[in-house]
Image: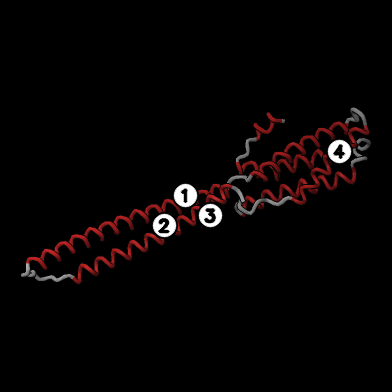
Amino acid sequence: MTILEWIFIGGIAATILLVIFAIYSLFRVVVHSRNLNKLPKKRIKNPKKRKKIAIRKRKLIKARKSALIRFILLLIMGGMTAGGSFYVKYYQSMNLTGTDSDSIAKAYYLLRDFNDQVELAKVQGDDQEKINQNIQYLSRSMASYGTKKASEVNTKEGQLALNRYYKAIMELGKNANMKYKNFFEDPALSEEYITSIKKIEENYEQPVFKYYKVDEAALKEEK
């Protein structure tokens, strides 16, 4: 579990405790009010008894006031804690987890490195064996995205966008891995895959970047 998930669970637990204490405080308000109502309404002639009742009344009024203040404060604290917890949950659902963030960054670089190698194969530049090895390695790395699933703490919409992106990367890598020896000698195949890469960037990568506000400029700088 992530730190944010622990914070959310802790916040909910704290909210429940605060609500329980608030209910207990409200119960005490009711009890003190009932005890006040049980006190004699008529003036007592006996001075000692009258004084005793007056002291008892002041204590009950003070206790009821304290319980009421405590109830209000606990209720406010419970509401703030609950609000904070659900904000953490919302924030987490709208932002990438560490695992998904790493997967997206890796996919970004894999796609562009793969594109570079396919471009080299298209113009038959550099060493054929080296290019084939690089394409094979990159293809297998992309094919491994078949095991990746978006974190369930994300929104359904966010999970769908991520899983589509991961699947597109996986399918591209899986298909390329079966043809990695053909790119160097078949410019048409290279062009086909270059087009596929652009489609993945436009149709799957950009929606993910837009939804999660990924800083593509920062990724470019790191590359």
Cα distance in 3D space between marks 3 and 2: 14 Å
In which quadrant of the rendered view does residue 184 lie? Answer: top right
Whether the residues at callouts 4 and 1 have beta carbons within 8 Å, the answer is no
Q: Amino acid at mark 1?
A: Gly
Whether the residues at callouts 2 and 4 have beta carbons within 8 Å, the answer is no
Disc 3 designates what residue? 9
Of the residues under marks 1 and 3, which one precedes in the sequence?
3
Q: Label 1: few (<14), some or many (≥20) within 10 Å?
A: some
Disc 4 designates what residue? 135
Percent of width and height locating residue 12: 49, 56
Cα distance in 3D space between marks 4 and 1: 48 Å
User: Residue 84 bears which disc, if any?
Assistant: 1
Relative to 85, say whether 213 is above or below: above
Of the residues under marks 3 and 2, which one precedes in the sequence?
3
Disc 2 designates what residue? 18
Whether the residues at callouts 2 and 1 have beta carbons within 8 Å, the answer is no
Secondary structure of residue under mark 3: helix
15 left or right of 99 in image = left
Which image quarter is the C terminus in? top right
Q: Label 2: few (<14), some or many (≥20) within 10 Å?
A: many
Disc 2 or disc 1, which is closer to the eye?
A: 2
Q: Amino acid at mark 4?
A: Ile
Whether the residues at callouts 1 and 3 have beta carbons within 8 Å, the answer is no
Q: Amino acid at mark 2?
A: Leu
Disc 2 or disc 4, which is closer to the eye?
A: 2
Secondary structure of residue under mark 1: helix
Residue at point 16%, 61% (across, down): 55
Residue at point 66%, 42% (across, down): 101
Cα distance in 3D space between marks 3 and 4: 45 Å
